[in-house]
Amino acid sequence: MPIVWGGSLLLPRRWQNAWLLLLSLLLYAWGGVSYTAVLLWTIVFNYGIGRCVNGRHGGLWLALGVVVNLGVLAYFKYTTFAVAEANQLLQLVAIPPFELPRIALPLGISFYTFQAISYLADTYRGTTPPQRNVFRLGLYVSFFPQLIAGPIVRYQDLNQQIAQRRMSWEQTAEGLQRFLIGLAKKVLIANTLAVPVEEIFALDFTQMDAFTAWAGVLLYAGQLYFDFSGYSDMAIGLGLLFGFRLPENFRFPYASRDIRDFWRRWHITLGAWFRDYLYLPLGGSRGGRWRTVRNLLLVFLATGVWHGAAWAFVAWGLWHGLFIVLERQPWWRLRGIPYAFVVVLLGWVLFRTESLALAGDYYRAMAGGNAQTVAFEWAFYWSRELTVVSLVAILLAWPWAEWLPWRPRFRPGNGWEVLRITGLLLLFLLSTNALVNNSLNPFIYFRF
């Protein structure tokens, strides 16, 4: 990190983007050189298409770019799933199955594919001019802080920053603080919650008691939020170090009062992407009630498919789409944080099990439907550390300051600065210690 940041600081401005592009490609290649060929192809292909989309037959060029980008994503992400489903159908008619292909999923392909489509769409609409410098487009697609796990940055939000960004000590200080907070959320909270989550979801759901089932999905909800929001905070913090201000991706999603509000707070950049590049082009809420319902369900079907190649992800997307459709009806009365939280929790079961059959067994356990149960050894897994982390997770997951009748004001001063910096250093030391000593460090969003 000192080499990457220091080199960018010391180089003349005209070389800073090239330096970041080089380092982004090298860091990506560290995860697999063959993946880098796909990333480089994405940059070059979309650069060429982008030069054509705002000219003659621009709509056809845009359609070609979108189809090819999505085709590449579908090949790497969904081919194995499609062949497996086809084999199940072939077994019904006694036809020999196809051999399952062994296709490695390139890291972050869902994220940078959507960013490439954003560039083509923004250029076609005239929101931004086509990028004539392939290296600047390459930096937009491959910028390492958010390449693997988001947030999804639209081209119109980053175009001017690539050309005119400035590095400053104020942004550096802000970025380091944001990065350390994100690191602590991921390493100290998400990884600690992951230990009992892994054990609970490895149990036989047909013999699980209701308390364990509810506790498991509650702990998973905390793990998922602090894992993904922690990565987003780290990406935003790293961006600030280099003069980029990336968009926010989370805003206390578990404080939502309905599912529409949840998607304004959870993975904000993904929701905004689907709104601007799918929902509105389909017609949005124009054209009557049934077209609005169709458009909403299509958007959330696509959201589920984007997250993974399994029927459980399809069901998860449609689960959210169904409640958003219901909430738009004048007769629907359910609102409030408990309602939205329970709906989201039930959806996380599909998200975590990735199987409709397993999700069904888990729901049965949550409802207390198992006649014979095996008690979970809570005393073995529940420690003082897990108790403290769980309480901290509850406190940090809710916007307490927004709900207080008065808001505490911290006046800048030497005492406050010393306390803040001491706290950040303590978080850094605790996070480093956890990374060194703990073997469990799951990366939930790598598969997306």
Image (cartoon, rainbow, N blue to C red):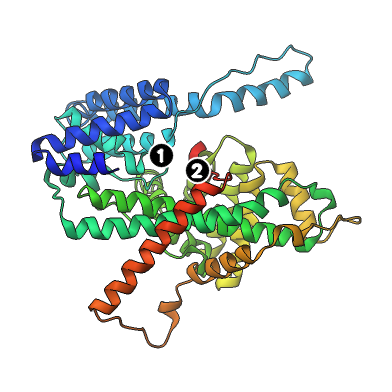
Give the residue pinned by disc 2: 445
Q: Residue furthest top?
A: 96
Q: Horizontal placement of 184 versus 37: left or right?
A: right
Front-lying residue, 286 or 63:
63
Front-lying residue, 88 or 226:
226
Residue 287: image tag: none
Give the residue pinned by disc 1: 148
Q: Residues within 10 Å of mark 1 (few under 14, many from 20)?
A: many
Position of residue 111 relative to residue 22, above or below, is below
Residue at coordinates 66% horizontally, 26% vertically from top-left?
A: 85
Q: Is residue 266 visible?
A: no
Marks 1 and 2 sit apart, C-alpha to C-alpha, by: 8 Å
The reply to whether callout 1 and callout 2 are in contact (CB within 8 Å) is yes
Q: Secondary structure at mark 1?
A: loop
Position of residue 256 relative to residue 241, above or below, is below
Front-lying residue, 30 or 40:
30
The amino acid type found where label 2 is placed reads Tyr
